[in-house]
Amino acid sequence: PPPPPPPPGSATGRGRLVVARLRGWALRWAFPVLLVLATSGTAVSMYAQHVLYRPGPLPEARAIVVPHGGLGQVADALRADGVIAGRTDFVIAAWVTRREGSLHAAELLFPAHASLREVLSTLRTAKPVQHSLTIPEGLTARQILAIFAHAEALAGPVAEAPPEGGVLPQTYHYEYGTSPAAILARARAAMDRAVAQEWDARAPDLPLASAREALILASIVERETALPDERPHVAAVFLNRLKHGMRLQSDPTVVFAVSGGAGPLDHPLSRAELERDDPFNTYHIHGLPPGPICAPGLASLRAVLHPADSEDLYFVADGTGKHVFARTLEDHARNRSEERRVG
């Protein structure tokens, strides 16, 4: 049989009474306490969701430069640029979500009205904004320098001009803060690769001693015509003249000599300029000039190394942007007369 209950007033009896009362109190207050905790947790969660996902103040999508530094510096920069409304919410949100990844310093594109969740996602996963700089075909080194001077997001001016004809005309992409020297180095390397590859694949029996000579002639072809289908024909004329020991007599080489590489002249070439004693004046010298007169494109380089099958030695503009070609001086004179009549 179970032991008899302790007499009232004993120590054991008083202990059991306390335990019973505590159990009653726990049962009475457990539900309210749990309800308060659940309610407060829900409120905190709702507040967090509100802070993270409410639209931000940025009125339209915008590229922002996020600086290097601590969380506070990033917050100050974003607030100054209108990406976030306040520093505290951003810092707390970044700390709470810190396991999702580190924040990156770069120029990043933030969407319009980006929430803190979107801002943090952009800082952690977005790729830096890409800028572009295009070097058109046929520009001189001085003209290319002017393009760099007006390019956005570059870190400082160009310290040294590129060599004439030494950069490949094309579009180069870069990030904010890239140095002009870095882009020029890429452009020079691109030209070196293109020249080497095209020279290795050149047609046989060309009157060119080196890849450098091919680059020089390509720069002349580039300035003589902007029509893709004419370039191999123009190149064939100059190559034929080299084979026959004739002067190239290319107007663009005289323009380069007279302008000092500044670009086109504001007047037609005069007889005195055509007779000017200059190493770049191909009316005065035999063979090729000592260097390129511009940055030729890949198409002009290929035209020189794969010229048209032609025995023509002359060409003249026909007044429509195209050229008329001739094999003999007599035909060339007739074409020139026709050109003057059209003009």
Image: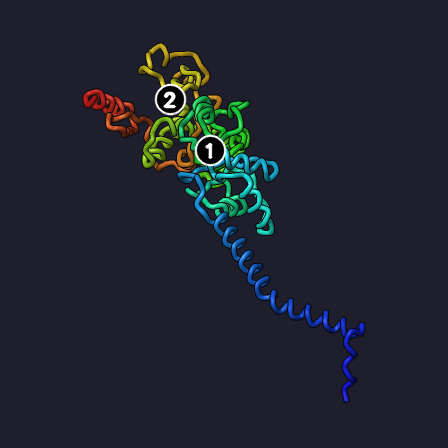
Depth check: 66 or 113 in front? 113
The answer to whether 39 appears left or right of 18 in the picture is left
Q: Position of residue 76 (x, y in %)?
A: 54, 35
The residue sitting at 55% across, 41% down in the picture is 88
Quarter of the image for the N terminus: give it: bottom right
Q: Position of residue 5 (x, y in %)?
A: 76, 81
Q: Tag 1: residue type?
A: Leu
Give the secondary structure at mark 2: helix
* Residue behind mark 1: 168
- Up-down relation of residue 190 to residue 22 (above or below): above
Camera sees residue 139:
yes
Depth check: 80 or 160 in front? 80
Q: Position of residue 64 (x, y in %)?
A: 48, 36
Depth check: 29 or 237 in front? 29
The residue sitting at 58% across, 63% down in the picture is 34
Give the CA distance from mark 1 to mark 2: 19 Å
The residue sitting at 38% across, 31% down in the picture is 235
Q: Position of residue 132 (x, y in %)?
A: 45, 35
- Up-down relation of residue 122 to residue 321 (above or below): below
The answer to whether 112 appears left or right of 75 in the picture is left
Q: Tag 2: residue type?
A: Pro
Label for residue 30? none
Label for residue 252? 2
Q: Quadrant of residue 276?
A: top left
Which residue is most to the left?
341
N-terminal label among 1 and 2 = 1
The answer to whether 7 appears left or right of 329 in the picture is right
For the residue carrying disc 1, how many other residues have a C-alpha within 10 Å: few (<14), some (14-19), or many (20+)? many
